[in-house]
Amino acid sequence: MESTRVAIFILSLLVVFGSSSAKVEEENPEFWRSQARTTLQTALDRKLNTNVAKNILFFLGDGMGITTYTAARILKGQLQNQTGEETVMTMDTFTNVGLVKTYSVDFQIADSAATATAYLCGVKTNLNTIGVSAAARNGICKSQKGNEVTSILKWAKDAGKSVGIVTTTRVQHATPATSYAHSASRKWYSDADMPEAAKNDGCTDIASQLIKNTDIDVIIGGGRKYMTPSGTKDPEYPKDYSSMGKRKDGRNLINEWQSLKTGKVAHYVWNRTDFDAVDPETTDYLLALFEPGDLRFEADRDPSMDPSIVETTEKAIRILQKNPKGFFLLVEGGRIDQAHHDGRAFMALHETVAFDSAIAKGLELTKEEETLTVVMADHSHPFTFNGYPFRGQSILGKSPLWASDMLPYTTLMYGNGPGHKITNGKRPDIRNINTKTKDYVQLSAVPTESATHSGEDVAVLARGPMAHLFHGVQEQNYVAHAMAYAACVGADLRHCQAEIKPSTADHSFTFSRGAHSTAALLSSLLSVLLVLTLLI
């Protein structure tokens, strides 16, 4: 009871002294009323865009739950010397927002493979499987036969559009892999990662499916080592054993990809210099693999060697948008998730800020009247935003209100993960610890080697043609069908047919109007003749 009274007293002091951080204009009620009136009028003036989407830009923030979204907004503002809370991210400008349920068929809390199959293929499935229905079983090759499901990337390609994937992970990772592969295990990156039984039963690894299943125009990410024979030295890290090629079958998939593109302008690049030299106007195909595995975190990225997600997104769009039939592009901020697994909020939030900048670049390069842009997360993490920090306090800092053990805590923490640091029943004293560094691991309540995912709904945001379809609370697999309907790809082409009808009606109306005009003219002539007859 005593500790509770002390906490209440301290909190009261914080409320008194913390209020001084408010901006002067925010103390005037008219500031908020005026802001709300402007927002309301914008909403009232908004007209639905019912065009057929020529292009689909799909941005997937892996692990970007609502807490991550909010905290990244604050960080983005604070990086610009603002208090942060009032910052408007690019994502915040999207007019249509909904929630999606992320559970898989077999688990309450899903992984990136099951969720990707839902939002890309339109079918919910089991944990750890990609591009197959729930009739397939995790790790059992035989079960995937006949249960394959295709993705919206393939539907778009079949409709004549150009297609691409951009990711900050390896291109064989769960999210990008689901756009082109079918596998009973998301972990079958190369044939070296597959059990012999699976290979004997006829299953193939994800990397080999990358160059076989769908003719993808642009592929950008990491994953070189899954494409080359075992022992092949990496061009960037020739002395690093872990970066060497992994394939046991002796195939060099990079060379095979190049051979498949004979007669086309196709470029394979692995570094910034070669990437910058690629001319989008003359390029038909691009395979860019900047790391043996996943790309580096944005905070660790070497700009002289690797382009940013903003730059890779721009290059992809400029190559794809030459197609008069349009394009589908999947852009994944994949390392948001991996930073959360490590319990490193700094890294996760900086990845999210970079992701938001890529979205801005996408909007800059496309026209909203013809491009449906969708942003969403696949799942969340046990990531909390707590305490009573002052307005404008560093999002990576500590709550000014200490806990009942009279020790401070960070405003960002995890429900589980590698940050569990209880020793002899006590938390570590972080008064003299800088919690704002990229290597700081936030405290977690439960010790796990890696932070898990969490199961709450995630946001989906949309703007452009038929963006109003993204509304309410939906199953995650609905997203693929809504995007496909908007662009008239896949099985449901009603939107294309609906667009033709008004045109037909207009012609009918014009003809009818012409008929009425002719009738009126004849009537007038008859009247004149009648008058002349009477005069005679």
Image (tube, helix red, strand yellow):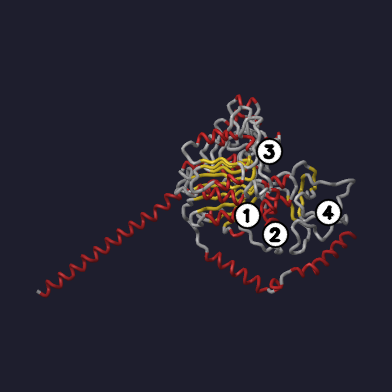
For residue 381, the mark is none
Return the disc, 3 or 1, that comes first in the chain's sequence.
3
Mark 1: give few (<14), some (14-19) or many (20+) Cα within 10 Å.
many
Residue 114 visible: no
Helix, strand or loop at mark 1: helix
**Residue behind mark 3:** 237
| Nearer-the-camera pick, 230 or 116 | 230
What SS does tag 2 mark?
Answer: helix
Circle 4 residue: 433
Which image quadrant is residue 239 in?
top right
The answer to which image quadrant residue 231 occupies is top right
Element type where label 3 sits in the image: loop
Residue 409 location (% of width, % of height):
82, 55
Crowdedness of circle 3 by 10 Å Cα count: few (<14), some, many (20+)? few
Which amino acid is tagged 4?
Answer: Ile
**Residue, x 36% and y 56% (percent of image)?**
505
Q: Tell me which numbered mark, 1 or 4, is placed earlier along the sequence.
A: 1
Of the two numbered discs 3 and 1 in the rendering, the one whose residue sits closer to the viewer? 3
Is tag 3's residue or tag 2's residue first in the polypeptide sequence? 2
Q: Residue at x 70, y 62 (%)?
A: 84
Question: How would you rate the neighbour count of disc 2 (Cα within 10 Å): few for under 14, some for 14-19, many for 20 or more?
Answer: few
Quadrant housing the C terminus: bottom left
Nearest to the observer: residue 90 or residue 464 = 90
Residue 384 seen from this side: yes
